[in-house]
Image (cartoon, coloured by chain):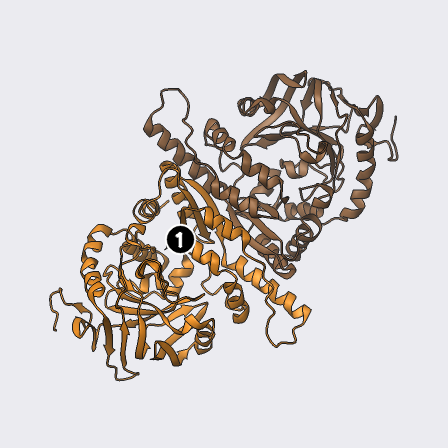
Chain colours: A orange, B brown
Amino acid sequence: MDERVREHAEVLVDWSARAGAGDDVVVDVAEGAHDLAVAVAEVLGERGASVTTLYGSEEVARAYLKGHETAVDEAGDDNGGPTERFGDPTVDLALVEAADVYLRLGGGRNTTATADVDRAVRRAYASTRTEVREARMDTDWVSTVHPTRSLAQQAGMAYEEYRDFVYHAVLRDWESLADEMAEMKAILDAGEEVRIVTERDDAPDTDVTMSIAGRTAVNSAASVAYDSHNLPSGEVFTAPYATEGEVFFDVPMTIEATRVRDVHLVFEDGEVVDFTAESGEEALASILDTDAGARRLGELGIGMNRGIDRFTDSILFDEKMGDTVHLAIGRAYDACLPDGESGNQSAVHVDLISDMSQNSFISVDGEVVQRNGTFRWEDGFEG
Amino acid sequence: MDERVREHAEVLVDWSARAGAGDDVVVDVAEGAHDLAVAVAEVLGERGASVTTLYGSEEVARAYLKGHETAVDEAGDDNGGPTERFGDPTVDLALVEAADVYLRLGGGRNTTATADVDRAVRRAYASTRTEVREARMDTDWVSTVHPTRSLAQQAGMAYEEYRDFVYHAVLRDWESLADEMAEMKAILDAGEEVRIVTERDDAPDTDVTMSIAGRTAVNSAASVAYDSHNLPSGEVFTAPYATEGEVFFDVPMTIEATRVRDVHLVFEDGEVVDFTAESGEEALASILDTDAGARRLGELGIGMNRGIDRFTDSILFDEKMGDTVHLAIGRAYDACLPDGESGNQSAVHVDLISDMSQNSFISVDGEVVQRNGTFRWEDGFEG
């Protein structure tokens, strides 16, 4: 086995999840992540943790939802839409509530494995599982991916090349990156309003403002000790509200197995009041209709990981890339909110990304903190 | 996909598990059982059940136990054996207790995947999981296998040939077989003592008696409705006690990743007092030392499935084959016991099989019910 698989497992268990003796750890294994699961189980055995492994297969999930569709078709439906008859996720809830740590090892064999599942069915299923998602977020959860051929293909890369890309992003000096990101966190914590501006020749300009007053930014250094739950990470994010203006997202991505490109959102009073997309507009519409919170922002993130040097059509990597910002519609993370206060609630959390490397700036309370991808404290910054 | 995979899933869900709308179903998927998991999820979606999928990977299990060994080695151990420091299986217990149905889809990629794990470590781990096993047996659990190349190899068969073998055994008229087996159940329910005799030229004779008074035989027709939890099945079994005599098991098998052949057990006062094995004697000794119950019988089973026509070194199939009997050391099944009474308790349940087709008979209370593999009610029976 590639020794980097073992190193990945050690970073995941020791730096990211801080899992140790006596911890009850759930490991959720995608179809192609077997080798990483083996390495993670070995490390957890060495640390004295208990391990439960779930099979996080997209093909199994698709089959279950298609079976549901078949039953609904056979039963007939006078209302013009699928009847919802999913049971309560009793077992999933019990297991997540009993877990201290939840490690999601992504990496399937086909990123569009669920492409032919009816969106309404998918949404109905997701809406039955809100409690499970919330309970999972109460654990020390971490999401990572094992490099698979499917993800390499999604990225438009050779398999060997993609593995190098992933391990370059994952096997970093996280402590050092955390120090770099602390400066941006300090600015956002002290700030009240963020403005993001990009001028484009061939697409709508971005000019959007949002309030961050009273919110706490997360220094997302790929460890639960930093309230950071992705490996790799390398972003600073907070939970904005009262969003006003227009945003154009020029980084293409795959959302719920659908290619989405050139999304344009118009916000008034914190809500999306108009939207278009060059591709995937129907999928976007379906997401925005999930619930009331799906039309409000849950996250503003600023990518600061310069070890990620290209877009690979994977949110786990793309949103962390230096020279980018991302906004997520849907659920906000509790870590950004004052104790006991709840932010935007939704069954969805969908990130959209903009390249900030040209004709762009981010300002906080009127002061520019990044222009054309260069931060205020970096060489070459032009205020 | 081979349409027999879908048929297998339907038999498993509808006949065996009787799973339906509102049931909370755990599906435990071995490494090579993906296709069956997909088919089972589809059927469960059609029926309106909830589904949680576990990854039942032997390689992940091995890695965890090897990690434990490494940690113990590094910590040092003055007692000459591995220190036990497995945590409580909190998550596994919570999920099993929340489940109505537990479907184990066997079929790995290497039947000896855990061969190099220290037996004492394996036993220590198993002993921490008694509660999980007991809770699983309180569900409507069913074990089956998806035909894999690894199992074909274990059976000494080509892959296509093995698939035919498995589906021939699984896709049967179970209702009809249940009727045939009812006669043997009636005899055992009414009986008080069973005697099994085989005379051999080249190996020790078998001559063993055991009490079955007060015990209830299970008509194991591959359905929870019959207290039967294997698919395929096709045996009648009960929980004997007060075993006396000697038994020679001439059917070779793989137990805990070790080849075991020609086991000879000597019973006095219900306990194994002497044992030998031509191969795997060390593994057998380790099993017998698990706990006090591991030296007593938990099961007497009479194979009655004539659709299984050869030994394939898989207990799921071998023990159901017509012309065989098997005895299990270790845990007894509650279904065989009077309400509220507990039978033999143990962390293990290991079946051993004898061919009864020649120079053999089974008698109940002195009356021969099978001679040389032919039952009393079959043509050609010689009382």
Q: Residue at x 43, y 38 (%)?
A: B64
Report the side of B63 relative to A368 (left or right): right
Look at the numbered disc 1 and give the secondary structure of its residue. Answer: loop
The vertical placement of B192 against A300, above or below, is above
User: Is residue A174 at least partly visible in the picture?
Assistant: yes
Residue B235 is drawn in which quadrant? top right
Residue B65 is drawn in which quadrant? top left
As drawn, the residue found furthest toward the front would be A340
Looking at the rendering, in which quadrant would you find the N terminus of chain B?
A: bottom right
The amino acid marked with disc number 1 is Asp
The vertical placement of B15 against A296, above or below, is above
Q: Which residue is mark 1?
A: A138
Query: Residue A43's x, y, as percent?
Result: 36, 40
The vertical placement of A95 against B267, above or below, is below
User: Is residue B156 at least partly visible in the picture?
Assistant: no
Report the side of B123 relative to A35 (left or right): right
Q: How many marks?
A: 1
Query: Residue A20's x, y, as percent?
Result: 35, 40
Q: Residue at x 30, y 51 (%)?
A: A223
The vertical placement of A186 against B137, above or below, is below
Asked whether A183 or B263 is in front, the reply is: A183
Q: Residue at x 36, y 72 (%)?
A: A252
Query: Residue A71's x, y, as percent?
Result: 65, 65
Counting other residues with Cα less than 10 Å from the Cα at mark 1, is it few (<14), some (14-19), or many (20 or more)?
some
Asked whether A198 or A272 is in front, the reply is: A272
